[in-house]
Amino acid sequence: MRVLDGRTLNRAALDRQLLLARSEMSVADAVGRLVAVQAQETNAPYYGLWTRLAGFRQQQLTELMTGRAVVRGSSLRGTQHMALAEDFLWLRPLVQERILQARQAGFGGVTKEWDLDELATEARKLLDGEVLTRPQVARRLAERWPDRDLQALGWSVQALLSVVHPPPSGTWNVGGATPFALAEEWIGRPFREVGVDRLVRRYLAAFGPASVKDFQVWSGLRRMDAVFEGLRGELREYRDEGGVELFDVPEARLPGDVAAPVRFLPAFDNLVLAYADRTRLMTDEQRRVVCVGSEIKPTLLVDGRVHGLWALKHDRKARNAVLTVECFAPLPDASAVEEEANRLLKFAAPDAAHELRVTSLAD
């Protein structure tokens, strides 16, 4: 069985994530390629697509959302993602049990005496043909159950019902209360049940070669060994340098030792969240700085690996944008980072004065 070293795995991941060269593919095709784009932070999907696609503009993703071709809702790991509407219709049922487990962990104690089926039925009635924010849904339900915790009501509905969060919520620079719409109503088509093997193949095509544990961390699903075993004859098999078995779709290529450009990845980027073993991207020491609790910080890639963190502060009133880059080590090519940083500033704050600050995390 072929053994793949860390650099080969790094380049394979970058290639499939459109990070070796900006792609000319459409925004819709890129969202589909990535399976689902992490959307816990409002602007993160926009940054993630900008760093992967040539000529990407914010309006392109916003138009897909307003046109209902892309939707935002709870899916992988029970967290907020954007996905093609056609993918959400089979992806959400696959992860529904994981979403319910997360609800139970967060609010099981508060809701242990509740009839959750009754709650779901009443919430569905409220949302039939309507778009209501999470607080609005909670307050309306509290009219029937005035002694119940409003936060537990709102978050329970988000888990019990398959809802999406319509725009303008979640579009570029737009926050506020999260709106709920019944997914089947908003998309206009019913959910479809498919086997988890479809998700495995889509994951490997976008992130492979990868292990069973990698897939479980990315998807939030558990006990997937039997699923991979059932696919063994249809997948390529490798091992990493530590002896861990890796799987891949047969049609995927390994690009070899090619150059990797500087890239800025947003918070919670797909690439960083896709593996249990993240050493193909960063050291264990760096991981402890990048991945803090449930937070995944924005990262700078140099030669395909995490080299630092970044943060952008845009004062729209003062029309000033400051991009701060904190590096783990000296930059091998500061000019390449400066060029990409200037592209990022022009994308995020085209009408502002720009400032780039590069510091060391050791300072």
Image (cartoon, rainbow, N blue to C red):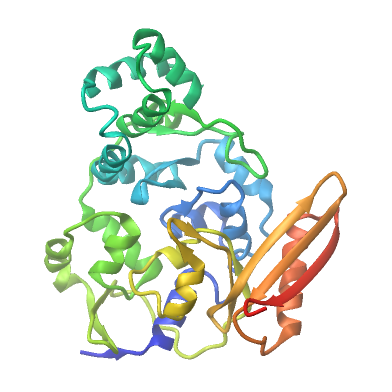
Q: How many marks?
A: 0
Q: Is residue 36 left or right of residue 218?
A: right
The quadrant in which residue 24 appears is: bottom right
Query: For the N terminus, which image quadrant?
Result: bottom left
Q: Is residue 329 above or below residue 87?
A: below
Query: For the C terminus, which image quadrant?
Result: bottom right
Q: Is residue 43 left or right of residue 226?
A: right
Which residue is drawn at the image coordinates 72% and 67% (left, top)? Answer: 324
Instruction: Tell me if residue 106 can be seen.
Output: yes
Which residue is drawn at the image coordinates 88% and 48% (left, top)? Answer: 318
Q: Nearer the viewer, residue 264 or 283?
A: 283
Q: Is residue 290 above or below residue 29?
A: below
Expressed as whole percent of the image width and height from the top left, the position of residue 282 reads 47, 78
Which residue is drawn at the image coordinates 74% and 64% (left, top)? Answer: 323
Expressed as whole percent of the image width and height from the top left, the position of residue 119 reads 29, 19
Expressed as whole percent of the image width and height from the top left, the position of residue 251 reads 33, 74
Which residue is drawn at the image coordinates 40% and 66% (left, top)? Answer: 206
The quadrant in which residue 350 appears is: bottom right
Q: Residue furthest front?
A: 363
Expressed as whole percent of the image width and height from the top left, the position of residue 207 reads 39, 69
Q: Nearer the viewer, residue 18 or 103?
A: 103
Q: Nearer the viewer, residue 296 or 130?
A: 296
Q: Nearer the viewer, residue 155 or 161?
A: 155
